[in-house]
Amino acid sequence: MPRTLFEKVWDAHVVADPPAQLALLYVDLHLVHEVTSPQAFDGLRAAGRQVRAPKRTIATVDHNIPTEPRGTPIFDPIAKRQIEALQKNCREFGVRLFDMDSAEQGIVHVIGPELGFTQPGMTIVCGDSHTSTHGAFGALAFGIGTSEVEHVLATQCLPQRKPKTMIIQVSGKLGEGVSAKDLALGIIGKIGTDGATGHVIEYAGEAVRELSMEGRMTLCNMSIEAGARAGMVAPDETTFAYVKGKSFAPKDQDWDDTVAQWRKLASDPGAEYDTVVEIDASELAPFVTWGTNPGMVVPITSRVPELPVNGADRTTAQRMLEYMGLEPGTPIEQIHVERVFIGSCTNSRLEDLRAAARVAKGYKVASGVRAMVVPGSQQVKHAAEQEGLHRIFQEAGFEWRESGCSMCLGMNPDILRPAERCASTSNRNFEGRQGRGGRTHLVSPMMAAAAAITGHFTDIRNWRFQ
Amino acid sequence: MQPFRKHTGKVAPLYRANVDTDQIIPKQFLKRIERTGFGEFLFNDWRRTADGTPDPKFVLNQPRYAGASILIAGKNFGCGSSREHAVWALADFGFRAVIAPSFADIFANNCVKNGVLTVVLGEEQVSEIARKASEISGYEIAVDLENCAVRDQQGLNTHFQIDEFTRHCLLEGLDDIGLTLQHAADITAYEAKHPIPSAWKS
């Protein structure tokens, strides 16, 4: 019977399928960070258990850490304690840690791929919902809670209910200035923030095949914002070219053998999905969110929507607009911003920074706007500096900072003040996400850079590049 | 884990769609390395105004809902971040069950691991329960996992679906790591066939 990409990866990882229980799935790679792991390691200690496969477990610090120059003391004593707990746990249990001072530190979903740990066909988990990012490689990658982190540390397995499958067929080509981020926002706007609940999405079609690995990571990253368990893209030559030569990727003869296996992963012709969604890429525009969830999104050329007539929806929309400080009917291009954040596991890779720098080049950040660029990892930062991107940003008046999650969730000191409005390349515009009372609009890196320069949302398709 | 069999308790209505885990437990409280004490911060930014005083308009601050142990929520409850701290906060605050038209996947998994029951009912039923909770003082519901039923004193008597394995784990309060370790031989056999990638061994 023809099988989907997801089914092939699933089938290859079933360790046991006991009757009246869930299937037991083997985990190839477990990514760990400081926020969702301390209680899991405590649980191991309390039960006298070890980490079953320390070599399949890698850790880094990303959520909490300041993006000030490295070496600046961490002033938040609770954050410091959490970081120290991870250091201690990794030492005690023999887990590889890419620590604050490491040249390979970065956001967990940036370093997994760039170090070559993330590979096609793998099962990958992490105590972080944006683990879906790694599905860009044709891996089955999903976020888990801390109890499940403990479960994987102890057993390298997870009991799992088999999810449903959804294919999102993206036909046509994305227009100039329309990025993978806009594709992701367009999909969520269409199917809703719970449109893919209980499903694993496979992204397919011409526009997806043409995306770089960075673009595919952006797309898969946002799968969780549509409620999906995971998002996947079948591996192809683009994937293999990205993985080849990475520090922890297969080498020599091993490489050829492994790629031969990876080539078999793509969904078979005739494979069936529980749900089919079709999107025409050529109809998409650069998007801007206006509300407090990622499904509340409109094209840049549009306006803040009128209030729905219906009772409950009307109350919800009113509440959102009140929080966002917006009036129905306001043209999106007339919304002014005070802050701009370019970063996060969605959009902080080299390609994202190149796209933003291309927009910023030769311009200055508008007066009254504070704009930050936070590379996803030390390797991204170093590569960007080799190309001189940092100078373009700095000359334009952007802050160029150290790597981490930063203002995506504001666990470190990078936060919005109440009522501050931010164009952000991150993934969630929830109330208070970037700081209590802060107003987040999700956009692509190019759109964020343009908003920083003009001081308001601007259609990047009309930009005069210098 | 605390087993869940039957529970009768006061109902608090928070009948809004898409309540995300950032609202349930805001990020500033995720830095603690303990598993306990999160109840104090449940819905912090909705419960307290910016200067830290309780907001009397918020449902959980209203005296009539004091001691509530069943939360009524809108669809897609618990969406967003995977933070289990959200469930720890609900449980620590005293909630044993959440009733909603739908739940986000990771949140629902996290609930099971902590003995918190998520009950899925139809949108109209949930809306009706929310209405009763806001109109009837001291309104209580009985959630019966043994019979997969939800009842009240006002004529509600409905059944809900839950997969048999989850139900079993909750009824028995099972440690599922222990269950998985019963398959240690299968795991070892799988690992023998699927060795650690050589580049990872150094």
Image (cartoon, coloured by chain):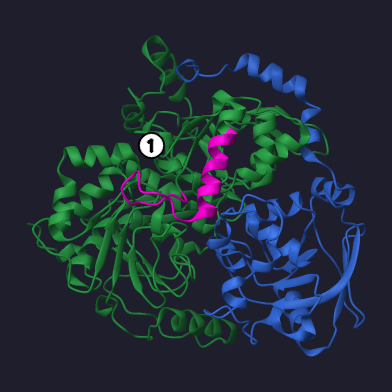
Chain colours: A green, B blue
Q: Horizontally, is B33 left or right of A347 in the view?
A: right
Kindly identify the residue that appears in the image at 25 percent across and 80 percent down: A334
Write the start and end of the magenta stretch as one range: A63-89
Q: Horizontally, is A326 left or right of A465 in the view?
A: right
Whether residue B58 appears in magenta in the rendering, the answer is: no
Under circle 1, the secondary element is loop
Question: Quarter of the image containing the C terminus of chain A?
Answer: bottom left
Quarter of image, res A459: bottom left
Quarter of image, res A258: top left
Mark 1 burial class by Cα count in 10 Å: few <14, some 14-19, many 20+: few
Kindly identify the residue that appears in the image at 11 percent across and 62 percent down: A363
Residue A319 sits above or below residue B171 on the image: below
Question: Residue B107 location in percent, x, y?
Answer: 65, 56
Whether residue A74 appears in magenta in the rendering, the answer is: yes
Kindly identify the residue that appears in the image at 78 percent across and 90 percent down: B135
Question: Residue A67 location in percent, x, y?
Answer: 35, 51
Question: Residue B168 location in percent, x, y?
Answer: 86, 47
Q: Is residue B38 visible?
A: yes
Quarter of image, res A2: top right
Kindly identify the residue that appears in the image at 14 percent across and 49 percent down: A391
Where is mark 1, residue-wise?
A101
Q: Horizontally, is A121 left or right of B186 in the view?
A: left
